[in-house]
Image (cartoon, rainbow, N blue to C red):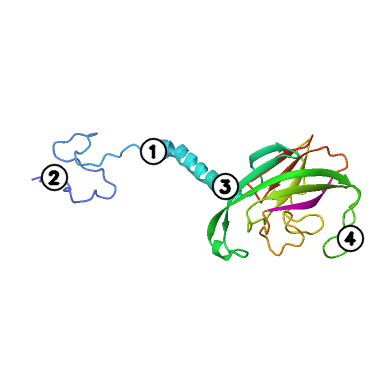
Amino acid sequence: MTTLVTPAVPGPDQGTPRGGAPSLRPGMLPGMIPPDAAVPRPRRSWGRRNAVWLVLLPIAIVVAAGASSFRVWAFWWPVGLHQEVDRVAIGEPAHLAGEYYDAFGLDVPERANTTVLREVDATVTGVEQVDELPAPSYGDPVPVPEGSIVYEVKVHFVAEPQTDLSGCQIALVAEDGTRYGESTTDVLGNSNRCSTPDAAGFVSEEPEWDVTSYVLADPDAEITQVRLAFGGPEYVTFDLP
C-alpha cells in the first residue's frame, strides 16, 4: 500500500526554505502584491525637494546685499567730501554747517560725548602762486619739491568763539578734478589750517580772523576751485575766475 505525503506549506512567519521558491498566501495568484506590502514611493528630484528654498534664495540675496550696502554707506559716508552745501565766487562768503560727535571734549569739556553743530562763514580773499614757502613756525625751512609749484591761499573766517576748527581742509581743485592739499596738515607742518599760528588749541578765540595756507600742485594744473571742509562730508566751494 502506497501512502501519499503532502509537503507542508510554510506559514506567514516562517521563512522560505533554502533554495525554494517563496510560497503564496491563500487566495493569491502568482504576480499579485500582498495588500500589506510596502509600496516604494518614487524619489523626488533635487529641484522639487528644494523648491521653496530656490524661491526664497533671490529674496535673501537682495536683503543681504541691501543690509551690506547700508553698512558700507554708514561707515564710509562721513569720510571724504561728498556733500557740497554752498558754492560762491572767490571774494564772497560761504556758509559751512555740519554736525560732529565730540567724544572727548578736549578744548571744551562740557561738550564731551555730545553732538555739536559747527557753523563757520568763510571767504577766500586770495589765491596766488608764489615762488617759495615761508619759514615754518618751528623747524628748518621747507624747500619747494622739484616738479611742484606753490599756491598761497588766504581765507577770512567768521564764527562763534570756541568753534571747533580741528580737521580743517583747504584744498585746490584743478580743471580735471584733481585735488591738491586735502590733508589736514599743510606743507609747513601746521596741523590746524583754519587757526592762527598763535592759537592755543583747536577752537576759535575771536569772532573773526584770517589765515594763510600753502598748497603744492603740479605746474601744468589749471586751478579752478578752492574747497573748504572739516573732514567732511560737507564742504563749500569757491570758484576762481
Please tell me in which quadrant of the rendered image residue 96 appears: top right
As drawn, 223 above or below 155:
above
User: Which residue is nearer to you in this view: 179 or 191?
Assistant: 191
Expressed as whole percent of the image width and height from the top left, the position of residue 218 reads 85, 44
* Quarter placement of the N terminus: top left
The mark total stands at 4
**Mark 1 — residue?**
52
Query: Which span of residues is magenta-colored?
Result: 208-217
**Mark 3 — residue?**
72
Residue at 62%, 65% (x, y): give it: 106
Give the spatial CA distance, label 2 vs label 4: 126 Å
Give the spatial CA distance, label 1 vs label 4: 72 Å
What secondary structure do most residues of the magenta stretch adopt? strand
- Given contact means CB atoms under 8 Å apart, are the residues at marks 1 and 4 in contact? no
How packed mark 2 is, by other alpha carbons closer than 10 Å (few <14, some 14-19, many 20 or more), is few
How packed mark 3 is, by other alpha carbons closer than 10 Å (few <14, some 14-19, many 20 or more), is few
